[in-house]
Amino acid sequence: MAMASIERQGDTLVVQPRGRLDTAKTPLLDRELQPHLDGIDNIVMDFSQVEYLASSCLRLLLWLEQEMEGRGGEVKLIHAGKPVLRILDLTGFRDVVHVIED
């Protein structure tokens, strides 16, 4: 089963992961993303279906942000629920990626 729906829109990748992005599932998401990153400058992560983020997912977000920043782009998180926003606040990741609240 796929961890996310992934759609390319020009130089932007729109990713909608599902479920818990824990230590076991984050590497699966990473593997799904890798083939789509060529020619991408921006990533929009739609977290509307994400219930939980583990530190492994935060590392992936950090790596993606550094990668996109090096290309002149960025990572944006949209539609994150309160539990995910709380994790981002507690870890300081709101300063790492652009969080766009509903």
Image (cartoon, rainbow, N blue to C red):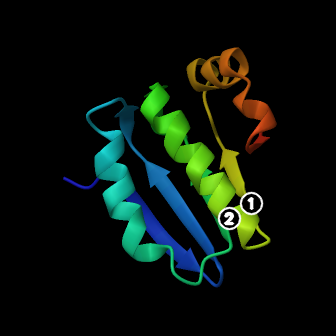
Q: In which quarter of the image is residue 87?
A: top right
Q: Callout 1: 10 Å neighbours few (<14), some, many (20+)? A: many
Q: Quadrant of the C terminus?
A: top right
* Residue appearing at x 58%, y 84% in the figure: 39
Q: Mark 1 points at which residue?
A: 74
Pick the front one: 47 or 102: 47
Q: Position of residue 91 (x, y in %)?
A: 66, 20
SS state under label 1: loop
* Residue appearing at x 70%, y 31% in the figure: 93
Q: Mark 2 points at which residue?
A: 68
Amino acid type at image mark 1: Glu
- Vertical comparison of 94 with 73: above or below: above
Q: Position of residue 17 (x, y in %)?
A: 43, 48
Give yes or no for contact between labels 1 and 2 (Cβ–Cβ under 8 Å).
Answer: yes
SS state under label 2: helix
Q: Quadrant of residue 21?
A: top left
* Residue appearing at x 28%, y 50% in the figure: 28
Q: In which quarter of the image is residue 33?
A: bottom left
Mark number displayed over residue 92? none
